[in-house]
Image (cartoon, helix red, strand yellow):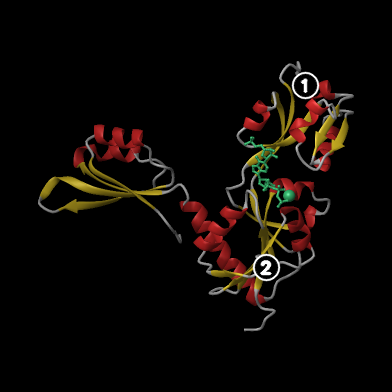
Amino acid sequence: MDKQERLRIAIQKSGRLTDACFDLLKQCGLKYTRGKDQLYCYGENLPLDVLLVRDDDIPDLVREDVCDLGVVGENVLNEHPASHSIERLRALEFGKCRLSIAVPESFPYRAPQDLSGLRIATTYPNSLQRWLQQHGVAAQSVTLSGSVEIAPRLGRAEVICDLVSTGSTLIANRLKEVETIFHSQAWLVKTPQPLSDFKAAWVARLLQRIDGVIRVKESKYIMLHAPVHALAKIKTLLPGSESPTILPLEGQSDRVAVHALCHENVFWETLESLKAAGASALLVLPVEKMLP
Ligand code: PRT
Ligand code: ZN
């Protein structure tokens, strides 16, 4: 195979997105060896190599065609001045967070105008500036490179604009979230340059596999036995399922086996309701892959 004819994907070297990226690539069938320098993984069974970098470098690596693909948070893309030239292929359902404005607990916040004249500490000055302009607020953005949440205590700003996921960092710093600028998750992105037919075909295959992985993430395969007279009720209790398969049970005319793929997690409460409706021998299995 020509050396040029390998796809290269940039992912975060070490951070919140790293494990989920490797998990996704593995679930898509990639086996790799990690290079000595730990910056490059050679795909052993697919023409796909992985470059490990800081997440902030991913938009430029993809935009400048050093990498064909990348996985990066929407927050990093939104902040990049030329992000419109990067093609977004798939939202990957991990790395979820939101960019929010938070004020000290005692701040009597009602509306964006309350921020007028204040200093807002952030590592996302472009995203913040856009939001301030949209809301007609004249506030001063103070760009920091990290530890934004302690800026109010240090007297560097009155208010902050930062990523939030669980909210515990805000609580620990006696801040409260008052506005959400946008929600974010990790995206698979692609270079704006056209790909060779060979590479394009591999990207299409990878996308099909990613779709299969994302689709089954919360899915379960459920099997149970049910009295025929309770089938209608039992079908309504199966969470997010397509038409179930009904199979006869040897030697039993009044009971059948029901198999269903449920596109939602199946909780104990659901199993208890199914049992109460007459189901027995309930079995819930994880689903690993799916090709519709
Ligand atoms: O070294 P490198 O530059 O690659 O890493 P980094 O430090 O810039 O990024 P990293 O690993 O912290 O985050 C990578 C990506 O994960 C981000 O760009 C987001 O897309 C996503 N992500 C998801 C988050 C969070 N959740 C998150 N909670 N990124 C950061 N945080 C921080 C936030 O800044 C705040 O300090 O976590 C704190 C708040 O968390 P909670 O749970 O207390 O609300
Ligand atoms: Zn970063």
In the rendered image, is residue 131 in sight? no
At which x and y percent is residue 193? 76, 68
Mark 1 beta carbon near ligand 1 (under 8 Å): no
Residue at the outermost left position: 251
Q: Amino acid at mark 2?
A: Asp
- The mark nearer the N terminus, 1 or 2, is 2
At which x and y percent is residue 82? 82, 54
Numbered mark located on residue 111 in the image: 1
Q: Amino acid at mark 1?
A: Ala
Residue at the outermost front position: 36
Q: Is residue 134 left or right of residue 286?
A: right
Name the residue carrying label 2: 37
Q: Which residue is rendered at x = 23% and y = 37% of the image?
A: 230
Instruction: Kindly indicate whether the residue at mark 2 contacts the one at mark 1 (C-beta within 8 angstroms).
Output: no
Q: Quadrant of residue 107?
A: top right
| Mark 1: secondary structure | loop
Q: Nearer the viewer, residue 38 or 64?
A: 38
Mark 2 beta carbon near ligand 1 (under 8 Å): no
